[in-house]
Amino acid sequence: MFMTYHQTHDTGGIYINQDELYMQEAIRLSELAIEHGNEPFGAVLVKDGTIVFTNENQIYSGSDPTFHAEAGLLRKFCSATHIMDLHEYTLYSSCEPCFMCCGAMVWTKIGRLVYGASDIDLCSMLEVNGAECCSLVFENSIWKPQVTSGVLRDESLKILSRYFKKHTKG
């Protein structure tokens, strides 16, 4: 299920939609992940127009291959707040979440997912086969969040490309 969000914010005379505003933060976090020695992925959790939690990929700094930006965010948020039903929340991710992270979104009943670059974009860059992870997981699950893809895709791809020209995945 796809949705377009039209609310805008004035950022110094330039109007951008709300999805782009939160995606800019997810992309900024992906750059921070690189600075902290991790892969370039960032995630932002929003409820009622307010950022309530953020996270960056921490697979290397946390010595945990499952500490992806999205799954890590959900794990930490649910643990800190004891809220496990996130149907009123939107998760913004700089890149399409992997199968594991999509599964975590099903279990937490995330209401909406917005992402920048797709897994196919990323894997094409890595010269491997990619997949439509979100579609495959959500279409075969009892919980089906709304999905908006391609928000600030080119900005996300620039960071991914810069990083993966010098590093291998995983």
Image (spheres, rainbow, N blue to C red):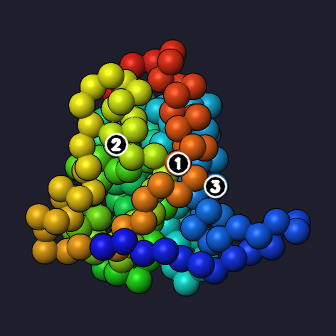
Q: Which of disc 3 and disc 2 is earlier in sequence?
A: 3
Give the secondary structure at mark 2: helix
* Residue 34 horizontal/vertical position (percent): 56, 32
Task: Tell me if 47 is positioned left or right of 18 in this view.
Answer: left
Taking 54 as reference, is 160 above or below it?
above
User: Residue drawn at (46%, 18%), measured in percent from left and top?
Assistant: 167
Q: Which of disc 3 and disc 1 is earlier in sequence?
A: 3
Q: Residues within 10 Å of mark 3 (few under 14, many from 20)?
A: many
Amino acid beneath label 3: Gln
User: Residue drawn at (61%, 38%), measured in percent from left and top?
Assistant: 31
Amino acid beneath label 2: Asp
- Tags 1 and 2 touching, CB below 8 Å: no
* Residue 70 horizontal/vertical position (percent): 39, 54
Please state which of residues 132 and 95 is positioned toward the viewer in this rendering. Answer: 132
Q: Which of disc 2 and disc 1 is earlier in sequence?
A: 2
Residue bearing mark 3: 24
Residue bearing mark 2: 119
